[in-house]
Amino acid sequence: MCGIVGYVGERDAVPVLLEGLRRLEYRGYDSAGIAVQTPDGLGWRKSVGRLTELEQALAANELHGRPGIGHTRWATHGEPSTTNSHPHLDGTGRIAVVHNGIIENYQALRDALGACGHTFQSDTDTEVLPHLIEAELAQGAPDSETALRQALQQARGAYALGVLFADQPDTVYAARLGSPLIVGIGDGEYFIASDVPAIVKHIREVIYLNDGEIAVLTPDGVTVKNLEGEVIEHKRHPVAIAPEAAERAGFETFMLKEIHEQPRVLRSLLESHLTDTDRVHIPDIGFSDDYFQLLRRIMIVSCGTAYHAAMYGKFLLEHLTGLAVETDLGSEFRYRSPRIERDTLFVAVSQSGETADTLASLRLAREMKCKVCSICNVVGSSLVRESDSILYTEAGPEIGVASTKAYTAQLLAFALFSIHVGRARGELSDARAAALVKALAAVPDAIHYVLERADRIRAIADKHHDGPSALYLGRRFNYPTALEGALKNKEISYQHAEGYAAGEMKHGPIALINEYMPVICVCTQTDDEVYDKMISNVREVEARHGRIIALATDGDRQVADLAEDIIYVPPISEEFSPLVNVVALQLLAYYAAQARGTDIDKPRNLAKSVTVE
Ligand code: AGP
């Protein structure tokens, strides 16, 4: 989604804004622009396409000044074009606005402003904002800040804003309602940004703005107010991310770096949740054992990859806690009539903590008086702030649009949570819980084993990448693995892919199988009948001459005899095998995308954090 950066300080704002926008590229965008104060009023440049286009526009027509605001736009209202790019200006060219979100009543506002003589250049909802501010000033608002507040009181919908006035030197305004925005505090410099990694190397502290707040940034500091103009005291949080976390560290892409970070991320998440005696300990869970004993039901809601984690969470919680567990997609849950009672625990899962549909579902659950626990990666995000309890995934910034380390960290969070709840409810004995912890502890090394064999996976991807479609099959705990493997492939290689529960294949997708169709079968060994059933499904594919690519446990001859190509993973317990298996599928998608020549970190049309529904 759109990205915002703003800068107040002594430096020329232009390079600072460009660098910040570059670090926000991963969020997804199709045009970009900046505005700065110059001695002659506001100066701005905009362009369609990547930031290099904007840099070329700046090289052709230089711009310098301070302070400034910048924006990467992911088109919602109006096609990607220079006119529709931000910043948008008022009729006098003295007020510039960058915006993330949607002004839902923009048409009514535009009509009313149009009737008063305002003319609009773009198709965007955003453009009404500078005109509204202009109108408030024309109607007697005593200063820019009051005009901004009065304008925002008329806007419905969601926004994160950066606003620059030609007549107010050294000042940037920021405002937030429903879309993420932070204020960064450096040494005599102040920033706004859609997220911390964009400005991490310049700042020491962060203020997480709340909905309905306006921040005024000047060289003297930051003041936060509400829409009535009352000053609000805000806690400043130290920056918890190391600046190197937002760098590629020698990897060709952020996605590859993040795939390779998984053993370290999972090991550290595990260590922070195990006691000296290797018992699961979730310090901030916030619910007593009594609460879990009386609990009747869990409802897990999320979107995309996080929804696949939710499905895994459901299977594992049912398996280890005896609770009834349901899942739903955020975009569905919020528009059906969910029957959840107050004794249901609502679990929201999100890497970013800003996904609009997940947040809206959480708010619905709160209205129904449910307790809310969130599994989230981003400290200070909206989801975190609106939850009763948080289980952080502690994966560090995830910059690649396709989620990898955040997903396996979500799976591990569910594993820890399930063991905790299973113990609290008396469903798991000490011995069983200890055996599960031991099996979990083997996961980071098993992932390392897969990563060490990346070349073999690359060779398989090179062989199969050019077909029009691929089918991914898995069962039980690895059914979500099949869905996630297919999603990764679609997202970054643009090859059509379907994930299916293997037992469901003969109810439809089997019609797709012919001698050209790659079928990726997750058939790692288990001690029970699921493995045998999976082998039967693989035989069904074989009988129709499908091209079987199998994910199998090291040394499994039975699968080797059936498959055209095989990716081995080390033996791992069935419950936790998805954490290892999915890494092989991430790599398979990665190398297929590389062979197909796509822009892996910034796949077309996708946004990292989907802050509009
Ligand atoms: C992951 O690869 C995707 N880009 C996407 O499905 C993502 O998981 C989804 O948008 C949810 O995001 P969240 O975890 O930040 O809520």
Image (cartoon, grey):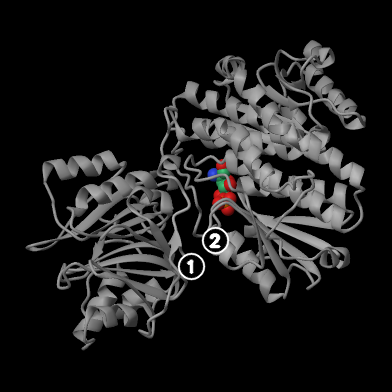
Give the numbered dot on residue 246. Answer: none
Asked whether residue 591 appears in the rendered view, the answer is yes
> Which class describes the residues within 10 Å of circle 2: few (<14), some (14-19), or many (20+)?
many
The yes-or-no answer for disc 2 within 8 Å of ligand 1 is no
Give the numbered dot on residue 178. Answer: 1
Snapshot quadrant of residue 466: top right
The residue at 45%/28% (across/down) is 251
Which residue type does callout 1 highlight? Gly
Q: Position of residue 353 (x, y in %)?
A: 56, 57
| In the image: residue 390, left or right of residue 249 | right
The residue at 43%/39% (across/down) is 602
For the residues bearing labels 2 and 1, Cβ distance under 8 angstroms: yes
Which residue type does callout 2 highlight? Ala
Give the numbered dot on residue 356. Answer: 2
Q: Position of residue 93 (x, y in %)?
A: 16, 67
> Which class describes the residues within 10 Å of circle 1: few (<14), some (14-19), or many (20+)?
many
Snapshot quadrant of residue 244: top left
| In the image: residue 511, left or right of residue 469 | right
Asked whether residue 329 appears in the rendered view, the answer is no
Q: Position of residue 171 (x, y in %)?
A: 22, 69
Q: Position of residue 498 (x, y in %)?
A: 66, 35
Q: Which sits in the foreground, 123 or 179? A: 179
Q: Which sits in the foreground, 399 or 522? A: 399
- SS type, badge 2: helix
Q: Earlier in the sequence, mark 2 or mark 1?
A: 1
Q: Which sits in the foreground, 593 or 298? A: 298
